[in-house]
Image (cartoon, helix red, strand yellow):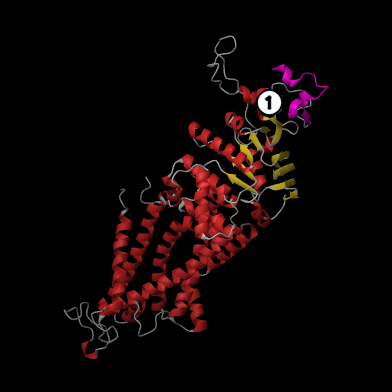
């Protein structure tokens, strides 16, 4: 239903997103993972037409076949809430502290759907029930500071659902919540996606959350989509060195910090930091930090190699003629 | 309950006093403020005339009370008009951004360059002196002040996540400005309005002193001051009373504005800085 076709977002010389391509099918759930500053939030903003004014967007952003890249704010507004909606990381910051919750949620119903106040109220109550907010009628009159973080995120989900969007972009929806509440929110998002046949783009750096929430996954690094495929397959058999490093950097609960030989295991880290956007290597963005770097990595951008089971990874080591196969090394 | 700043308390007391007296003058004054009594000129304070009478035998207290009302009305109308236009311009500039924002703010800068009194004198020269012209001039010089304050505050609010959430929910910039930006910039705008109220009182007094504000027989602190000037050595109290009123009113609103700023935005507080 929505497709990004080689979309780049440039701030002057710096590329926040480099020819990123994604397809989101109706009702499908896609996860986007990566470190801070890898471009995953920018990708979410591309889907909403909310890229900052200072940025230059190139490529095609197709919504139901129509290219909206470069479309005006007025055009995008017609699609926001109805076709694509978004929820945010900080449920406290994403609600106007001076507005009653009911007024915030009813606003799009009054404006976009042209409902009367009584109808909008009924719809808001129904939405609150759908997202699992207890005593919905009482909540409508409350202010954001009066309810908990998890409830606020539910309010924001209800707000995003007001106009029955076909796609919900969730930008780190669980990062600011404690683990138990986060789990409930993920369950809610999955259930809503299934019952409403609503596509979900779940942006997170929490691999466990993405594993629970999504069917397919895209791993991003330095503005590139470096690996993609079915979530379970990518997380169990990663092929791109960056994905391998990312998964290796997770503290395991099951092994109690001990390796296969029973000795205490040091947590593996990826050496170095993500370079600033204006200082990324021209070829593979991961070159310079990659442990398996070969000659062409820094200068030549790797193409996406299609692997078994619909998995794809952009790495020179996966080329048929490459000296060592990345997957084989680990 | 945190302790209220001292300037807020003193300011609030002075402002209540001035506003209370102005309101009282609507229904009651000790004497008719325009009633002359030529035989009873330059009386000292007495049970009948609490602060005495002026050069035409009019009751000074009654005149000061009505003058307070006139002064408050002028300041209120001028700040309301100038403030509303300024806030709308500031919100508009902030919402549209880009060159439109630059243009509006540069025009505001030009507005700042006009000395308020000279501008009022110019208007009076063109249209003839009247209270309406004084109000218009004071309102006009308030526009860029409020445009600047509201635009700066609005720009901050535009970066908040709830504004992004409202955009994601399909709200337009106009609706966002009204529903989300305006309520959240109310605090700095109200603080500015209180301070500008003090400036407006002073400006009205100055214009009336120059004969460009309230016209006789409508009393005004500024005009009472200028009329008393020639009688300085005969009846200095006639200059002291209105002067004191101006000082107390301006001081009251200034302190109230500072106090409100202290409690609404502690970062800008002068009194609490260590």
Say if A280 sits above or below B140 in the image: above
Q: Is residue A91 visible?
A: no
Q: Give the range drawn in magenta.
A: A303-330
Q: Residue shown at 69%/24% (left/top)?
A: A238
Which residue corresponds to mark 1?
Answer: A233
Looking at the image, residue A147 sits to the left or right of residue A318; the answer is left
| Number of callouts | 1
Helix, strand or loop at disc 1?
helix
**In x, y percent, where is residue B145?**
49, 63
Q: Relative to B61, say whether B41 is above or below.
A: below
Q: In this view, does B19 lie above or below A256?
A: below
> Which of the pair A186/A88 is nearer the observer?
A186
Picture coordinates of residue B171 (x, y %)? 58, 55
Which of A288/B53 is in front? A288
Image spot of residue B139 (x, y percent): 47, 71
Residue at (54% x, 49% y) in the render: A159
Q: Is residue A320 left or right of residue A207?
A: right
Magenta run includes residue A45: no
Quadrant of the image for the C terminus of chain B?
Answer: top left
Report which quarter residue A327 is drawn in: top right
Q: Does the magenta stretch include residue A313?
A: yes
User: Which residue extends farthest right?
Assistant: A321
């Amino acid at each position: 239903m929505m497709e990004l076709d080689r979309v780049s977002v440039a701030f002057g010389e710096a590329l926040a997103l480099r020819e990123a391509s994604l397809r989101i099918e109706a009702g499908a759930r896609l996860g986007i993972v990566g470190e801070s500053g890898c471009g995953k939030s920018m990708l979410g903003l591309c889907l909403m037409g909310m890229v900052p004014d200072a940025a230059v967007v190139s490529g095609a952003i197709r919504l139901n076949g129509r290219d909206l890249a470069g479309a005006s704010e007025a055009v995008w507004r017609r699609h926001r809430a109805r076709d694509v909606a978004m929820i945010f990381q900080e449920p406290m910051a994403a609600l106007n502290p001076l507005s009653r919750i009911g007024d915030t949620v009813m606003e799009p119903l009054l404006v976009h759907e042209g409902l009367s106040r009584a109808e909008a109220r009924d719809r808001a109550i129904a939405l609150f029930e759908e997202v699992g907010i207890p005593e919905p009628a009482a909540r409508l009159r409350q202010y954001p500071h009066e309810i908990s973080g998890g409830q606020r995120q539910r309010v924001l989900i209800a707000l995003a659902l007001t106009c029955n969007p076909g796609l919900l972009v969730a930008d780190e929806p669980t990062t600011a919540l404690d683990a138990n509440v986060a789990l409930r929110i993920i369950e809610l998002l999955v259930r809503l996606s299934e019952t409403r046949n609503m596509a979900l783009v779940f942006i997170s750096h929490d691999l466990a959350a993405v594993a629970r929430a999504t069917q397919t996954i895209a791993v991003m690094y330095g503005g590139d989509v470096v690996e993609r495929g079915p979530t379970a397959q990518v997380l169990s058999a990663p092929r791109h060195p960056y994905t391998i490093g990312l998964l290796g950097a997770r503290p395991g609960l099951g092994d109690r910090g001990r390796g296969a030989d029973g000795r205490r295991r040091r947590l593996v880290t990826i050496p170095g930091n993500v370079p600033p956007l204006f200082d990324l290597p021209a070829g593979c963005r991961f070159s310079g930090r990659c442990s398996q770097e070969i000659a062409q990595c820094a200068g030549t951008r790797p193409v996406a190699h299609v692997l078994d089971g619909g998995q794809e990874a952009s790495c020179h080591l996966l080329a048929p003629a490459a000296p060592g196969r990345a997957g084989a090394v680990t | 309950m945190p302790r209220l700043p001292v300037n807020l308390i003193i300011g609030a007391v002075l402002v209540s006093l001035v506003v209370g007296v102005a309101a009282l003058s609507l229904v009651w004054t000790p004497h008719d403020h325009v009633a002359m009594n030529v035989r009873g000129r330059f009386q000292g304070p007495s049970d009948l005339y609490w602060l005495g009478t002026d050069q035409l035998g009019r009751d000074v207290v009654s005149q000061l009370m009505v003058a307070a009302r006139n002064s408050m009305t002028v300041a209120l109308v001028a700040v309301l008009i100038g403030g509303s236009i300024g806030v709308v311009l500031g919100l508009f500039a902030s919402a549209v951004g880009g060159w439109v924002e630059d243009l509006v703010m540069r025009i505001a800068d030009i507005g700042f360059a006009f000395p308020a009194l000279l501008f009022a004198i110019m208007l009076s020269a063109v249209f003839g002196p009247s209270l309406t012209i004084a109000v218009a001039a004071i309102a006009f010089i308030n526009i860029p002040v409020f445009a600047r304050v509201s635009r700066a505050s609005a720009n901050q609010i535009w970066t908040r996540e709830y504004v992004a959430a409202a955009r994601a929910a399909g709200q337009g910039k106009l609706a966002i400005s009204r529903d989300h930006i305006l309520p959240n910039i109310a605090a700095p705008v109200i603080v500015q309005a209180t301070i500008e109220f003090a400036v407006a009182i002073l400006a009205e007094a100055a214009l009336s002193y120059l004969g460009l504000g309230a016209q006789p027989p409508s009393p005004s602190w500024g005009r009472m001051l200028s009329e008393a000037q020639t009688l300085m050595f005969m009846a200095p109290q006639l200059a002291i009373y209105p002067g004191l009123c101006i000082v107390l009113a301006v001081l009251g609103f200034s302190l109230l504005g500072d106090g409100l700023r202290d409690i609404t935005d502690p970062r800008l507080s002068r009194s609490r800085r260590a």
